Image (cartoon, rainbow, N blue to C red):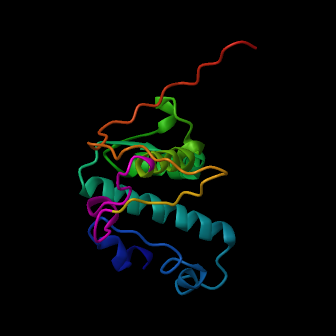
Amino acid sequence: MLLAEPYYRREPPKSTGKELFHAGYLERFRPAGLSGEDVLATLTELTARVVAAELDRHGVTEVLASGGGVRNPVLMRRLGELTSASVGTIDALGVPSDAKEAYAFAVLGFLSWHGLPGAVPSVTGAREARILGSYTPGAGPLRLPAPAVGTPRHLRIQPEIRTGT
């Protein structure tokens, strides 16, 4: 029943949250007496199946996952079993999985600082490209750089260089 959710069949870009998936939503499907452990196991399997199906539907061949889900060995194992894509983590690239949000906000800040949109229709489903965020100047005036001429095509993360002790 959970796999029949129409949201899963929508074409990307798509995004949702608590407006659709909340405790009340889950309770509609939860059989009486189902333990908390069984609920978590069910949601883990649901997540693995939905993600794997979307990876295969879109022809994804490699996944470098990040965030808290990478610490769930059952989820990561099931993703590897259910999809034809290679499944790993961004740790393999030297980027800590737990740092995903910090890196994302750094990229969004860079884009905004340089006058580049951080929300574009092809990725977020926004109606039009938009520069994100706001700035609060300190004691002095805020001086932004001239808007960027082009759009970045690559992100290079350099390893931390430690000097001294």
Q: Residue at x 45, y 58 (%)?
A: 48
Q: Position of residue 71 (x, y in %)?
A: 60, 46
Q: Residue at x 39, y 36 (%)?
A: 155
Is residue 59 shown above or below 26?
above
Q: Quadrant of residue 126?
A: bottom left
Magenta span: 113-129
Q: Residue at x 41, y 48 (%)?
A: 111
Q: Residue at x 45, y 51 (%)?
A: 108
Task: Name the residue at the right extreme.
Answer: 165
Q: Position of residue 8 (x, y in %)?
A: 35, 71
Query: In the rendered view of the protein, which quadrant contains the N terminus?
Result: bottom left
The one of 124 and 43 positioned closer to us in this rendering: 124
Q: Is residue 157 magenta?
A: no
The one of 28 and 103 positioned closer to us in this rendering: 103
Is residue 22 shown above or below 110?
below
Query: In the rendered view of the protein, which quadrant contains the C terminus?
Result: top right
Q: Position of residue 134 (x, y in %)?
A: 51, 60
Task: Name the residue at the front extreme.
Answer: 140
Q: Position of residue 137 (x, y in %)?
A: 60, 54
The one of 79 and 133 positioned closer to us in this rendering: 133
